[in-house]
Amino acid sequence: MAAPVPIRLQEAFSLTASGVNPAALTFAATTLESDKYVCVREASPADPTKTHVVLIDTARPSTPLRRPISADSALMNPSTKVIALKNGTTLQLFDFASKSKLKSHAMAEPVVFWKWLDSTTVGIVTASAVFHWKTTDASSPPEPMFDRHASLSAAQIINYRSSPDGQWLVLVGIAAAEGGKVAGRLQLYSVAKKLSQPIEGHAAAFASLPLEGVPTTLFLFSTKPVAEGAAPKLHIIEVGADTKAEGAPRFEKKAVSVYYAPESGAADFPVSLQVSTKYSLAFLLTKAGYAHVYDIESAECLYQNRVSESTPFVSAPHEATGGVMAINRKGQVLVLSVVPEAVVPYVMSKLKDVELATRLASRNGFPGAERLFAEHFAELFDEERWRDAALVAAESPAGSLRTEAVIARFKAAPSEEGSPSPLLIYFQALLERGPLNALESVELAAQLLSFGRVQLLEKWLKENKLGCSEELGDMLRPHNVNLALAVYIKAPAHPKVVQCLLETGQTAKVALYVKKVGLDISHTQLVQMASAYSPAAALELANALQAQGALVPAGGGPTPDEAGSSAQRSGVDHTAMFDMFMNKGMLQEATSYCLDNLKSDLPGDGELQTRVLEANLVNAPQVADAILSQDVWHHYDKHKIALLAERAGLFQHALENFSDLADVKRVMGNTHVLNPEFLLNYFANLSPDDGLECLKELITANPRGNLELCVTIGAKYTEAMGADRLMEVFRGVKLPDALFFYLGAVVNTSQDPEVHFQFIDAACKLQRYDEAERVTRESSFYDPERVKVYLMEARLRDPRPLINVCDRFDFVDDLVRFLMKNNQIKFVEGYVQRVNPTRCPEVVGTLLDLDVDDEIISRLILSVKNMTPVAPLVAAVESRGRLKLLLPFLESRVGDGATDAEVHSGVAKCYVEANINPQHFLETNPYYDSRDVGRFCEKRDPFLAYVAYKRGACDDELLAVTNAHALYKDQARYLVDRESGELWATVLNEENQHRRAVIDQVIATALPETAAPEKVSAAVKAFMQAELPGVLIELLEKLVLQTSNTAFSRNRNLQNLLILTAIKADPPRVMEYVRRLDAYDAEDVASVAVSAGLFEEAFVVFQKADTPAAAIGILLTQMNDFERAADFAMKADRPDVWSALGVAQLEAGHLADGVSSLLRAKDPAPYAAVISAARDAGGSPADFALVVKFLKFSRTKVKDIKAVDTEIVYALAKCDNRLTEIEDFVSQPNAADLEEVGDRCVAEELYPAAKLLFSTISNYGKLAPVLVRLGEFAAAVEAAKKADRVRTWRAVMYACVDAEQFRLAHICGLHLVIEAEELQDTIEYYTERGHYAEIIELLEAGLTLDRAHTSMFTELGVLLSKHRPESMMEHCKMWWQKCNLPRLVRACEVVALWAEVVYLHIQYGEYDNAATTMMAHSPDAWSPSGFTEVITKAGNLDVMYRAVGFYLDQQPSRLNELLSVLAPKIESSRAVSILRSARGDILGPLGALPLAKAYLLKVSDDNVPDVNEALHDVLIAEEAVDELSEIVAAHDNFDQLALARRLQSHHLLAMRRVACTVFRRNGKYEQALAIAKADKLYKEAIDTVAASTDAELTEELAEYFLESGLREAFTATLFTCFEYFRPDVALEQAWRYGVMDWSMPYMIQTLKEVAGRIMGLEEESKDKRDAVEEARKEEEEAINDDPSVLLYGLQPGANAGPSVPMIMAPPGGGGGTMNSVPQITWTPQAGPSAAAAAANMQTFAVPGQ
């Protein structure tokens, strides 16, 4: 038998199947930090420029999480949902669970590699250093650890690892080496020593291995040296050995060779090294997909195999199996798991190393070596080598020898006197190697406690050397409670932990612990437990439990009564907790608990709130007052609490809780006690109507005493109650100032006009003029018209209210007229001078309208000359035609130094109106408003308006007035002087009808008069922008050609402008201007002329400027006149001209002429143009000969000799019969790019030249296709061998296939089919041309190659299925492991090779599909044994059910064989349904059930209803009574009554007996009894009534037996039914039928039972009487011994029975330990009088007692 394989390989899932883009399966884009998550960064499917991060939970790979995140790299935390992102130099940490950013940092240099070292540390590697970034805080930057060694400077970093203790770090990199090899570089760093060591290696890891109980850190690294002959090794060394204690065991350095398969070649090397998290094993993965498994302790290789056909580029430990998870390039997520039960057998049978097997079993607990350890232990024990035997037991696999029996053997072993006992030696050895188990710990503790050595146990517990259990804690508790507590916590023994915490006073920790461990205990039980220690502890625990929400009551969740209460939040029954406190007399604690835990104030807590408040109102009113004052509860019985609060004198709280208006009004009458502030706020709780009623009640009951309070209330709630209604209330009070006080309180806040008017009215009537004046001055809400009329009619002695109204609301005219009408001129003057001088203009206007004397008005104006606004005053007087009246006032203001515009504007108007030298004033005064004065002057003198507008630069007004009055000359001068582009644009607008007149004046007058160039420039610019070229030319000719002013005539800008304007507007005049003028800018003018198409003018400009190169450029580029250009070049005869001509000729395609011109220019510079022209022209050989001449001339004069030499070779190739010259040229020193020339020759089919060039440079890759073109196939194959490139092989092979050179094609094809990317194209090329046999032969030959891959085997199979089907099965059996089975399956299905399809399905593990295929194509694919084997491995139940149908149709004789195999998997009910309905037309109503009887019997043990009923049907049909009885008795899951009813009419008596039994079993005793009587089944009848325990039914049966003369049956009935057969009935029946002797045994037994019961009752009654008498005597003795009875009499509770309620002790009254105290008298708060307090004194019982 083959040895079991210790490593299992399985594909966990496929990343491509999860939707990952295959292009993202790279080392840079895919990360695997642990076996929990795979993180992939890929391009977005919608937008390839954006990236997505795909997070795949390995437990749920079918539901990947995809997020649009732009990042260069993404790493998932090994244990939490935290992702690290890198974008450039920015690093960020995000928490997926909370959707928040945890941390970010910007690195100073790019990050080349990073990795999670553990769940809180990210290792970061840059080009120069290594950093650690902690995630435990939100701000710390990465911490530098060490600098990179120079040996890793050019290496690609592929890994970074840390030792478990973080003291050792290793950086792993790889670099390219000679010969295509890969060199490994390691940098090992010691954190403690801060030293680095470079090491050659490809992969590295750290491991922790305990040696004799001492933790040891090991460093593992694997290397495959680049040097020839050096063997690859795996090294395991100990690091940090110098830190271990003296004498501690050391690990001996190990180095073993690593085997690499020959077919993997030199390219294979280690890519990762992972250490198992469960076992002392290391996994080494290589680039070629091989896995090597090593034992770390011995460095022995346990297993090696190829696990992946592509490179596993990332890997991580697989914690669940102790193996490795890896991802390869195909996207397969592979899991290499350890098979524990196979390791030891494999090592012993395969490696033949028993010692290694035992070490592995001992260290890792692998099964399989128990027998060896047991034998060795027994041998040592028998030799009394106690320590060695103990060490064997300690190292036994999975602790197989650490049992109670072994301890008993050591305990019973003899010990020598003076030496330790074998048991202590055993424990000492175990402690040296590790911790004890629970059994050993208890036994050791018993030994040490007997000697009082508790400290040793405490020491070992801290060192985790003891196995904790509840038994150990119970043993330690009497000696050390804290030590026992630690043991209970680790055990865990949760109830004992709680008890110890309470016992040690650690109450605060109880709730946290209970919540943490989820202990199933109710809150009340916990608190009761705590109350036994301290009431304070009980309260603290109760609050902690509520705050933590730690428990759910033992009975489940909240009860229905708690719905909507705070109990829903934490499962705490607050009512039960309150009752518990009250029952223990702890009212203070009960109240505190409820206050702390009913803060949520939920409706469901209302009853409990009521009980708490009621208890405190009765026993502690001050507490109730404090509770109600806090306003934390709102769901108690408010009426009940209000009555109690009123009775207690807490009127404020009574008001808060009463809702009936009568109650409220009654309590509110106590205003002498109630706080006014409270009453004021209380009215907010009343409706407006109720509030008004209460207000009436208050003010009616005590008008003067409550007036202030009522006014305050009314003022605050005016908006709610209504001001009108409140005014009626206060108006009805017999107090004259009541309404005034109310209105005074609300007028400042009210916006009701009526309120303000009524207040003014009340104030005036009470002669409170100051208040009326204040309101009229400050209020904005009264009706000014109404108030004005009222005040005028009232004619108050104080005019201020009226003045305020008129002044504020623009009734100044009415005010002045009213005052003047009443001869109150002084009030008018006082109003202007003292109240509001700004109203002077309006007052003056009204006085002028009233024809008041001018002197009075002037005097009034002068009295406020510095305070009145001038502009309104001037306007008011101006509108009335009395401006002269203001001249003294205005001149006075000017004389005072006023510079206000309105003052000077007024003076200007007066001067214009009076014609007092106005033009001089307008031109010299700088202060007046030009626009205002100009408008004033327009109707009087337009020129004065022009002067005013010009002075103020009022452009629009000036244009309007000059256009309206034809002042064009003045307007033209203004335009030139203004220099405003916007103004010029307005005037020169074509819609301006005055434009021509103004332009004429500008040209004729304004511009000739000016000498300022900037003004001329502004005018010219304006004409240009207005697009008036004709006018502009006219203007410029006058300035440049028709003037003697040299400043203008020689001005370059004006000449340029003239020519350029002519180019645009009048091209025929350009040539004249060009010839006449000579100061213009030639280059600019020529450029514009060219753009305008005036090439001759441009040519003349360049000629005149003596620039022949530019001139010939015009001829060549613009006029395209090469003949004239050649003539011009001949005349000029300058190298630059010839060069320009030559370049242009080359660009025009005149290759020969261009080269000739360049040769005349002797200019080698345009060689690039010559080369380009030669490439593009494709000229004759003569042209290329000329090119060769020029290039040879230029070869020594240019820097880019490579381009020149290259083109010389190409030109020679284009010439006829010059191959020899080419060969001579290339043989000499040259810089030509022969490969490029060869490519161009190939493109132009110059194959001989190409062959010569490629041969010269030994470029066989390109030579081979050329040889193919030349028909030299054998030479082409030889060239392809030398090139050894895929594309070369491809080209040669295609050519050989087309030429049917199959031998040569076969040679090429072998190099192509091993490349997966080329295989399909190769096959298609052959098959499209019908060469099927040749391609099959090629693929068969390729299978023997080292690099044969899966696609080759698969595609060969596809070809065989189509073209050689007889060989398909042999191919499948031989190569199925290396094929893509799904593709082969599809290919076989197409050609109907069903046997092959079934075989492939089976090998691929698709047993469902295999079974389906066998059933669908049974003639070709089905076989009995094969189908049975397949169907047992199928996983789809539908396939199994279809198999049942298939067998029913085609193989009914084998049905039971199939069903017995499927029985453990299929649902028996459905199988029964299929069998029952199968072929009913032939088999009858039972269908195939009788055929499957064996199956039904087999599955009947499952007690399934359908199976039971089907089996019943079969057995009834077979009349198998015994089997049916057994089945019915054994299984009860069916419709028993239906079966009984069915059987009761069966023709067989045995069947009817079964029916009777079934009826009895189901309680249908009457039906069972009827069947028994009918069939005379007397035993069944007696058993039936005995089972019924029905006395009436039993007596009826006894009567039947007596009537039938069955005396023995009667006696049997009495015996069987003795317990419930009534004695009187039995005696009566016996006497009636004369069978007294037959009933005598029953009667004797009955008398015995009755006598015994009577005696027992007598004894019980006597004991109760004695107990009552004893209790009465003890109570009388207690009363007689109490001396307080003489002083106070008998207290109510002293002799109270159980029905008398007891009163709980008040807070602080000694409660908490006594069950009850005497009733407490309530003491009222400070109230109205002592008599009232005495009247209210009552006693109350706590509710619920």
Image (spheres, rainbow, N blue to C red):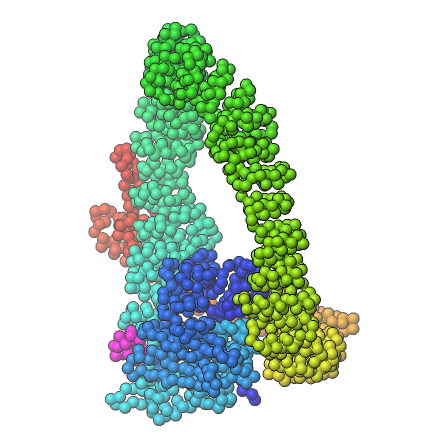
Boundaries of the magenta span: 440-460
Q: Quadrant of residue 808?
A: top left
As drawn, 1 above or below 28? below
- Magenta segment, prevailing SS (helix, strand or loop): helix
Residue 1579 visible at all = no
- Outermost residue, bottom direction? 383
The residue that appears at 23% across and 53% down in the rendered structure is 1682
The residue that appears at 33% across and 55% down in the rendered structure is 539
As drawn, 1313 above or below 1013? below
- Taking 1712 as reference, is 1068 left or right? right
Give whichever of 1382, 1537 is nearer the camera.
1382
The residue that appears at 48% across and 35% down in the rendered structure is 1047
User: Residue 1285 colored magenta?
Assistant: no
Give residue 320's position: percent from left, percent from top.
48, 73
Q: Quadrant of residue 1059?
A: top right
User: Residue 454 colored magenta?
Assistant: yes
Give residue 1319's position: percent from left, percent from top.
65, 76
Residue 1475 visible at all = yes
Give residue 1376's position: percent from left, percent from top.
64, 80
